[in-house]
Image (tube, helix red, strand yellow):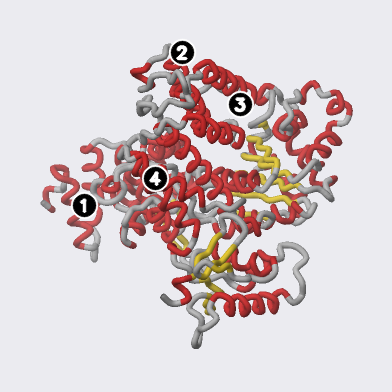
Amino acid sequence: MNSRQELRFGVLGPVEVLKGNVSLDLGPRQRRLLLVRLLLEDGRPVSQDTLCRDLWPTDRPTGAASSVRAHISRLRAVLDPVRQGRSTVLVSGPAGYALKAPAGARDTALFEESVSRAREALRNRQLPAARQEIDAALGLWRGEALAEATEHAFAIRERTRLDGALHDAKELQAAILVQQGETEPAIGVAQGLVLKAPLRETSWALLMRALYAAGRPVEALRQYERFRDMLATELGLDPSPQLRDLHTAILRHDVVVLGTQQSADPVTAPSVAPLAPLALGPDFASACGHPAPATAEATPFVGRQEEQKQLAALLSAATAGRPRWAVITGEQGSGKTRLTDELSAWAASAGFTVARTRAGQALSGNRGISQTCPTVQLLDALRQDGKDSAEDEEAQKDPLATVVDELTQGPTLVVVDDLDQAPQGFHRLLRRLAKVLREAPVVFVCTLRNPDAPVSSMLLADLALIGATWLTLDPLTADDVADLLAARGESAGPEEAAALHRRCEGHPFALAELMELPPGRRTGPEAQVPAAVRNILHARLVDLPDPARTMLTYAAADGEWLDLALLADVQGLAPDQLLPLIDAAVTARILVWDGEPGSGGTGRYRLPELPRDVVLSTQTPSSRQIRHAAFARELAARDGADPARLARHLRAAGPMAPAAQR
């Protein structure tokens, strides 16, 4: 083996590199942090500027670049000491520095592979093998994941993912222990899980099952009541039907459903019969050792790398006590909520209090939409102590000071969704906060569809003056679509990714809906329009005036690109009558204008695939034939008309085709 193959990298705890059984001396903390940053990229290069920004998010020294180069040089000497020529472990190039560590050399990959094998063994009822694999997986954890980078924004997303994977693995461990009859250890694992994630039903289901299998049904029922009360208090919700079914089965001692008899002596009982599935959802089933058939997972988060970096930088700045503001704009379905969901998860894992409002209404807290006072809404979103903000005397006396006090208790992320739909009073509150907050560990992220809405203009002007970060969510790229397909484990070529990108126009919502269809129904001759997308587009069509809808039926018959002169002639319209109809369709986001780069405003109107399919679906076959016949007559009367285009319209016109052209 060469030195590269012998190296093993660990980040499930303090970063370490082993060569054989010897732990290498990686040097000071900043050098170990640099190694973590490179490991997170999985072999992709990281530029020197990015390394400087991530290693020193605040108060960057003047010699940061030189320091990075020095640390790289010393890491090479440690990782690849006997190299001849360029290092094959820590390489450099025009794009930056990259650490080439194969998957089998990283503890994160070994952990995930062991968990996957444990899950497969449990599915096949091979309990000893499942136990061996899950113990090996959990044994790789030496402490907190990415321990060197706990305070650095670049590690937030991976830490969140790894922490979630660890929780999943411990749930799997508890399920295996229950099925092996080791109920007391299973109870201990499940109790730790519900303390770690008190609102996660899967962990509570495991705890209830483990207690029942240990011969403690009364305690299992008490745990259900405890979770039900917590869920009602925190979220105003009831347990899911699946958990209620489990509760009923325990009440009835339904051994057919539970698949087990109670153990009279849980300590000495050698084993417990396998637990039967409870017709639970995928999460419950996998936790209890009976995975349901594979279902489509939530759409993986792809693209938006630059936006993620900028938002992560704001979180880093906030930890130093500097308030930051960001404005995210984009049309409906452009991914604003998904981006802020990801940001909220990162922030929560980094110790931030996360408060969210939508259109000025709290999404958490005690009173929710029952209150309209902006201060009460924001306090409800911020507070984690169960206080009723509407009855807070201090808040009534000095509402602004109360909000400021809440915001300065610790690192806080406030997400304001749909700012342009919030009332004026909420805008006024945010304007005052923007002026008075000068030293506070807080980040405000506001999302809106229309930055030109009058209701938001004064607030946005104030935020511009204090240097707010402004992010406009553009459509996803074809590469993003390819990344999504790869993340879902689909082996699709570049042509398929490009076709899918063309069909959804890079629109995240449309893309997510298309991904719910079978692959053969997403693009091509058998392509379908997802129901949710169809409903949205149909609603836009309904809002158009009748002449504009008629114009679109002709445009859809002709194809993707609009030939304005031909389109006017087949309808018997003058150009000045056609253009207002086109403008209405563009405003309704049915037609789009594709400008030619550097052309000074020239371009063409286009009817994208999904809107075109919806427009065509609103017509009867005979209506479509009439429109194709109109195009055929007009083209036949023109000198120099494209023969292929004329032939296409004649075929589509069918019996309505002009007799002279048949």
Residue at 42% x, 19% y is: 262
Mark with earlier residue (3, 4): 4
The amino acid type of the residue labelled 3 equals: Leu
- Give the amino acid at mark 2: Leu
Q: Is residue 150 left or right of residue 96?
A: right
What separation in Å lies between label 4 and label 2 (alpha carbons)? 31 Å
Mark 1 or mark 4: which comes first in sequence? 4
Nearer to us in this view, 650 or 102:
102
First in sequence: mark 3 vs mark 1? 3
Q: Relative to 412, does residue 154 appear above or below in the rendering?
A: below
Q: Which residue is mark 2?
A: 251
The tag on residue 235 is: 3
The residue wearing badge 1 is 649
On the image, the x and y values in percent for residue 59 come to 78, 65
> At 30% from the left edge and 53% from the top edge, which residue is drawn?
559
Find numbered disc 2 in the image and state the secondary structure of the residue it sits on.
Answer: helix
- Real-space CA distance between mark 1 and mark 4, rounded to the nearest whole angstrom: 60 Å
Q: Amino acid at mark 1?
A: His
Which residue is depicted at the point 59% across and 24% down?
231
Could you say which is closer to the camera, residue 219 or residue 119?
A: 219
Q: CA distance from mark 2 to mark 3?
A: 25 Å
